Amino acid sequence: MHANAHALSGALDHDHEAYVEDNFLAFVVSIGRLTPSMMRVVLKLDGGERLLGSGHPDEWVRLAVPADEATPVVLPVLKENGRWEMPEGSDYAPNRPYTVRRWNAESSEMVLDMVVHEGGVAAGWAIKAKVGDVVGICNPEGRFWLPKGSRWLLMLTDITGLPAVGRVLEELPDGFPAVVHVEIPSDADRQEIGEMIETVADVEVSWHACHGLRPERPGYTELPRIAREITTLPEGPGYIYIAGEAKAAAECRKHFRDALGFDKRCIDAVGYWIEGQARV
């Protein structure tokens, strides 16, 4: 399901096919701490041969987790009226969106890298999860799409966008120039190129260890400040991908559009979460 490198750099202005809903039960194959702020969960999908990839390397799925230890995840079913509905007497499982870090169509195994934080529904599940636990997954959707003719990529994300950064960089063509800025809670959360991220692209990564609550400032993120410190862009046509807190991502987009005069049609700003709200 991975978009190949040629597709990423080739004729990328095409009409996407309509999203096809489908739902799967998935079993935890392995789970462990990747860095202090991130867990890696590997899931095996039941019926995974049906999964339709989005073709976008930042694609995400909704991960449905048990509401409590006594309530298993129940999937919606496709009714004769063409709608997906929960079986009578069953409740929706709490669910949250997560980036597909890797998908292996042959083994039907999916890798999700999950930021763990206090009070998170899915994060709370991940901290206690064990091999064999059952969750729900749907067909993925995505957004990242290099415009045709792009000569460079700039990615600016907080730690929630780091799984997308990893997959995008691993799927870029050989030698493609990419400048990446990632805001993380601590230096221990770095995912170094060549160690945790394998890429043949020409990549320059800057890590900013300032994500999270700090006594000296309000809020969790300094992404807009990091954006404002970017005062020049590479020559020629390119693509800017921003992911993080919704208002912060919009502010970053405004900087590149207004202060640097970059074509707004070649900027994607994705709100992965909203300050003060659950990420639903």
Image: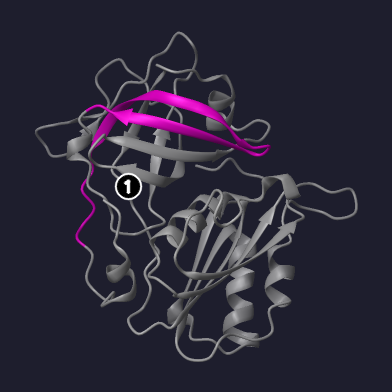
Percent position of residue 187, x then y: 74, 50
Instruction: Classify mark 1: helix, strand or loop.
Output: loop
Q: Residue at horizontal 20%, vertical 57%? A: 18
Q: Which of 262 and 206 is in front in this view?
A: 206
Percent position of residue 210, x then y: 77, 55
Q: Which amino acid does label 1 sit on?
A: Pro
Percent position of residue 10, x then y: 28, 76
Percent position of residue 108, x then y: 27, 35
| Apparent side of residue 249 relative to residue 73 in the rendered image (left or right) | right
Q: Nearer the viewer, residue 62 or 276?
A: 62
Instruction: Kindly indicate the quadrant of the structure image that contains residue 86.
Output: top left
Q: Residue at horizontal 53%, vertical 57%? A: 271
**Magenta-span inclusion, residue 38:** yes
Identify the magenta region.
17-46
Q: Main secondary structure of the magenta part?
A: strand
Q: Mark 1 points at which residue?
A: 140
- Rendered position, 210 above or below 92: below
**Magenta-span inclusion, residue 25:** yes
- Rendered position, 58 above or below 135: below
Identify the residue at the far right of this view: 216
Instruction: Kindly indicate the quadrant of the structure image that contains residue 32.
Output: top right
